[in-house]
Amino acid sequence: MACHMTAGATPLMNAHDTPGDALVDHARLAHELEALHPHCFGWAMACCERQRDVAEDVLHDVYVKVLEGSARFDGRSTLKTWLFGVIRRTASSHGRRERLRAVLGMREVSRTDRPPAASPADEAERGDRVARTRHALTRLSARQRQVLELVFYHDLTIEEAAAIMNVSVGSARVHYHRAKARMATLLFGDRP
Amino acid sequence: MTDPEREHLLMRAAFEQLKSEDARELPPFSDVLERRAPPARLTFGSPLLRIAAATYRAVVAREGRLEVPSDVVSLGAWRPVTDGLLPQTTLISATPGLGASMLDSLTTGALP
């Protein structure tokens, strides 16, 4: 996998003197992942076109990669930024694999263990607004969607978004401004 | 407050709602970690199976059609339709000698 992973010393995955050190690092890494889990889930949802099952599959793959050491954090960015990059690449390859499976006619057995979505009446309006936001996001290009999610949903800077999306800052800025204008039109019309 | 500022705030509010909606559906970390993807299976509607079935029907099930009919002429008896344009069919039945002209041999009848 081509991401910012090197075999060098890292803040979380150092060379271990004893097996005990490895266990401590592993536990620490798992703890860090758990702390970032809500953010990772939100980003995985964004990368998987808000398909929950797919997002969970991608996230599972990412966590396993990180914990097994096949994806290594090299400390050149924050753990969250690096992890988001891994999620984006994993979701991308997962999407390619799913498209190939669709061509070959291979289908995954659908999961039926999902609890039904709660639908209290007082949440209808809020649900409608969320649905409108989700729908508006589907009208944007993948890059535009990603940069908006990273900036508005995850409170990252455009520079951090560019690093995660693996594009130049200038390109990310262009995607951001175009996406914001398009999203505003889709959500609020010509004027907010 | 200017329009761009207001737009920015409204956009942020829209994403905040999306975020809180995702938070409500957040699966536990341990569930995601222990998650096992279900196996991918070939379904009956799969294009791959349909192609295989069509190939079977075209080749195996109609195998009788591949038999050569008895009235088909053999390769040895076949003659090209342009045969009639040649003055003699034994034009190059013998190899001309080295340095000899084939045209001469046609006019003098040196070749058999």
Image (cartoon, coloured by chain):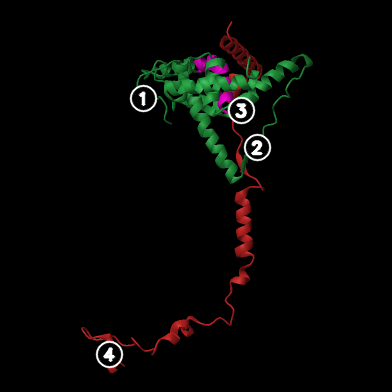
Chain colours: A green, B red
Whether residue A34 appears in this view of the structure is: no
Whether residue B84 is situated above or below residue A92 in the rendered picture? below
Tell me the quarter of the image containing the C terminus of chain B. Answer: bottom left
1 and 4 marks in contact (CB < 8 Å): no
Q: Chain of mark 2?
A: A
Question: What secondary structure is marked by label 3?
Answer: helix
Give the Cα distance between marks 3 and 1.
38 Å
Furthest residue to the top? B1
Dot 4 alpha-carbon crowd within 10 angstroms: few under 14, some 14 to 19, many 20 or more = some
The circle drawn on residue A109 is 2
The circle drawn on residue A7 is 1
Residue A4 in the magenta stretch? The answer is no
Which of the two marks, 1 or 4, is nearer to us in this view?
Answer: 4
Q: In this figure, which residue is indicated by the disc labeled 4?
A: B105
3 and 4 marks in contact (CB < 8 Å): no
Q: Quadrant of residue B1?
A: top right
Dot 2 alpha-carbon crowd within 10 angstroms: few under 14, some 14 to 19, many 20 or more = few
| Nearer-the-camera pick, A47 or B107 | B107
Type of the residue with mark 2: Val
Type of the residue with mark 4: Ser
Mark 3 or mark 1: whose residue is earlier in sequence: 1
Mark 1 or mark 2: whose residue is earlier in sequence: 1
Which of the two marks, 2 or 4, is nearer to us in this view?
Answer: 4
Q: On the picture, is A131 further left or further right than B104?
A: right
Q: In this figure, which residue is indicated by the disc labeled 3?
A: A138
